[in-house]
Image (tube, grey):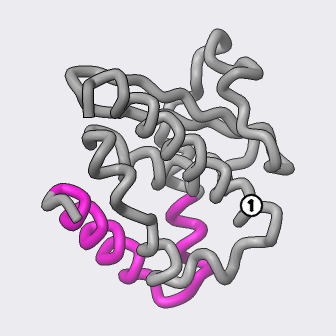
Amino acid sequence: MSATLEQKKRELIDSLSIFPDSYERFTYIVDLAKEKPDLPAEHRIDSFKVEGCMSQLWVVPSLDNGKCYFNADSDSSIVKGMAGILCDFYSGETPEAILAVEPDFLDEVGLLKHLTGNRRNGLSKVRERIVHFADSAREKVGG
C-alpha cells in the first residue's frame, strides 16, 4: 500500500475509533457530509449518477497531473458522508495506488455491519466507479 494511503487509512481509523459506538460514528459521518459543498447542478447529471443506490448519488471523477480526484454528493447525508470518505481516501492518488488498495478500513471500524444492504450496495458501487475511473486513467497516463 502506498505510504499516503496507509497514512490516510490510519488517520481514518483513528478518527472513527474515537467514537465508542456506531451511532456516534454515523453522526460524525453526517457532520462530515454537511461540511462538504454540494455539487454544482451541471455535475448532478446521469453520467455521474451512481445506479443501484436508493438515494440520489453522484460521483464526479477527474484526473490532474497523473492523480485521480473524486467528489460525491447525495440527497442523503449518510450516503454523502460515506461516499465522501471513500472519495477523500482515494483523491490525490495515482491510478495504480487506487487499484491496489481496498477500503477495508470501513469494515475495520465496524461501519459496514451497521449499514443497510442498499447502502452497502451503494457504497460498493462508489468503489466500482472509482476503480473504473482509475483503470481508465492508468491507460491515459501510460501505466
Residue topped by disc 1: 121
Of residues 26 and 68, the one nearer the viewer is: 68
Across and down, in percent, residue 15 comes to 34, 71
Q: Position of residue 103 (x, y in %)?
A: 45, 65
Quarter of the picture holding the N terminus = bottom left
Above or below — where is 48 with respect to 78?
above
State which quadrant residue 65 falls in. Answer: top left
Work out which residue is located at the far bottom of the displayed protein and give it: 20
Q: Position of residue 81 (x, y in %)?
A: 56, 52
Which stretch is magenta?
4-29
Q: Look at the numbered disc 1 and give the secondary structure of its residue.
A: helix
Give the side of residue 42 with respect to residue 51, left or right. left
- Res 135 → quadrant: top left
Residue at the extreme right of the image, as rendered:
54
What residue appears at the point 26 percent right and 34 percent down from the top-left corner?
143
Q: Going 72% across and 54% down the picture, which residue do you hit?
A: 122
Residue 28 among those drawn in magenta: yes
Circle 1: residue type: Asn
Residue 12 placement, left or right of 45: left
Q: In front: 129, or 107?
A: 129
Outermost residue to the left: 3
Horizontal side, residue 65 vs residue 38: left or right: left
Q: Position of residue 67 (x, y in %)?
A: 26, 32
Query: Is the magenta region chiefly helix, strand or loop?
Result: helix
Is residue 32 depicted above or below 42 in this figure?
Answer: below
